[in-house]
Amino acid sequence: MTPLEARLTEENAALRHQLEALRLENKLLREKVDLLIRRVFGKSSEQLDDGQLMLLLQGGDGAKKDPASSASPGVLEAEIEKRGKDTAKVKPRKAREARVPEHLPAVDEVIEPDEVVADPEAWRSIGEEITEQLDYKPARFFRRRIIRRKYVKRDEPYKAPIIAPLNTLQERSIAAPGLLAQIIVAKYCDHLPLYRQEQIYATRHDIAIPRQSMARWLGLAADWLRPIYEHIHTGVMAGGYVQIDEPSGAR
């Protein structure tokens, strides 16, 4: 082996030894960083004791350290104290809101023990336990009966009777304002087409409302709401410019 080959072989061996040492040091530093993260940001079950942490930072692993790495524990310890102070400055959590909103109306349901129901005179109430649940009552159909009484004057019984006028969307129409509002909101706010509403009313409420009737009611409601539309249209067109959301293919 020539002197040049021998020198290159020695340098190669030295570089390999240095690389292994750097890999080991890098692995140990990564482990220390992970421990620091767990110490500062981890959950209570994952956090380490300060003594254990400083033992690891000060070289408890037995690895060789250079002068630059020997000063790191002090810097890390100061960072831990700083993080602890920052954590102490965190604002306290807000009070937990009630699971059941208190502004809702309450419906009380009293449940009595069977022994008390059998002989109520033999028992005396000494308190109660209240369990609150959030409940929902589905929409329901009902008959709205509009009663208009007829009257005749007592001193003129032979004259034609009088009766209050009937103000409805259409003569002989069965749709009440509440039903019309439900159909409009379901179609234009909840995006339920009329055929789906027809299926829902038939399957859930056993009420047959043809979609043709609902479409006719929507047209009548649009005519009734025309003054509101015209007022809004006038206000929009009176501005300096009008913003619209056109389809991507519009010209």
Image (cartoon, rainbow, N blue to C red):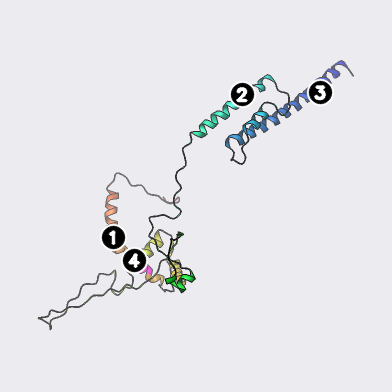
Residue segment shown in magenta: 214-218
Tag nearer the camera, 4 or 1: 4
Question: Would you call the spot at circle 2 few (<14 residues within 10 Å), some (14-19), or many (20 or more)?
Answer: few
**Do callouts 2 and 3 mark residues in contact (Cβ within 8 Å)?**
no
Q: Earlier in the sequence, mark 1 or mark 3?
A: 3
Say which mark, if any, is on residue 178.
Answer: 4
* Kind of residue indicated by mark 2: Gly
Q: Secondary structure at mark 3?
A: helix
* Kind of residue indicated by mark 3: Ala
Q: Calculate the distance from the C-alpha at mark 2 to the C-alpha at mark 3.
A: 35 Å
From this view, report whether residue 11 is shown above or below residue 32. Answer: above
**Do callouts 4 and 2 mark residues in contact (Cβ within 8 Å)?**
no
Q: Calculate the distance from the C-alpha at mark 4 to the C-alpha at mark 1.
A: 19 Å
Question: Would you call the spot at circle 1 few (<14 residues within 10 Å), some (14-19), or many (20 or more)?
Answer: few
Q: Position of residue 208 (x, y in %)?
A: 42, 74
* Kind of residue indicated by mark 1: Arg
Which residue appears at 64% of the width and 21% of the height?
71
Which residue appears at 32% of the width and 45% of the height?
241
Say which mark, if any, is on residue 13.
Answer: 3
Question: Would you call the spot at circle 4 few (<14 residues within 10 Å), some (14-19), or many (20 or more)?
Answer: few
Relative depth, front residue between 227 and 33: 33
* Kind of residue indicated by mark 4: Gly
Relative depth, front residue between 10 and 98: 98
Q: Secondary structure at mark 4?
A: helix
Q: Position of residue 35 (x, y in %)?
A: 64, 34
